[in-house]
Amino acid sequence: MGEAAKPHACDICHTVTEPFALYEIVEGDPSKGWQCGSCIADQTRLAVSKWEVESKLPRSSWDSEYGQALKAERNRRLDANRWAIMADTPLSLACQGKFIVYLKLLQNMTLDFPTTTGWTWPTVPKLEYPPRVSASISASVSVAK
């Protein structure tokens, strides 16, 4: 018969435990270590406690679920519109200036409004392009003839 497995220490709390009572920290990857049932229970209690605290936050708090959703949408809008102020943008300088103001309003959302109360989304500027250079050159050439 084979030799019985020896007790092993939990890699989190270091309590020596029978091998049958240890669980892989990352399921399917024993190289990441082993944890005991007590550590799993503690982690679960912490996660539930954090959720309970967050769920009781007032809707007006930027840390509430609603506030987090607003910040995620703000980040999406920032990412979707940054192209408008890049050096190679085809937009007019006036339009780029409007986008700079728009992006700054989004960026400062949580600074300018201490709570979610009163926050409204700024209007995305209308795209404006400079007059085509080739059209103005061909017009001046035809006038000169």
Image (cartoon, grey):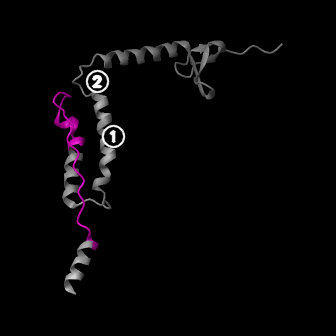
Instruction: Give x and y (percent) for residue 63.
Output: 28, 26
Report x, y in % for residue 13: 52, 18
Q: Is residue 3 above or below residue 142?
A: above
The residue indicated by pointer 1 is: 76
Residue type at mark 2: give it. Answer: Ser
Residue 114 forms part of the magenta stretch: yes
- The residue at which mark 2 appears reads as 64
Q: Is residue 87 visible?
A: yes
Q: Is residue 57 above or below residue 119?
A: above
Residue 56, image x, y percentages: 28, 16
In this picture, residue 5 sits left or right of residue 97? right
Q: Secondary structure at mark 1?
A: helix
Horizontal and vertical percent position of residue 120: 19, 34
- Can residue 56 be found in the magenta stretch? no
Residue at 26 percent across and 77 percent down: it is 138
Q: Is residue 120 left or right of residue 65?
A: left
Give the extent of the magenta segment: 105-134
Give, as a three-letter code, the residue at label 1. Arg
Q: Tell me the distance, in whole angstroms, between the alpha carbons under discs 2 and 1.
A: 18 Å
Identified at 61% across, 16% down, the residue is: 22
Q: Residue furthest bottom?
A: 145
- The residue positioned 46% from the left and 15% from the top of the image is 44
Q: Nearer the viewer, residue 52 or 123?
A: 123
- Secondary structure at numbered mark 2: loop
Residue shown at 37%/18% (left/top)?
A: 51
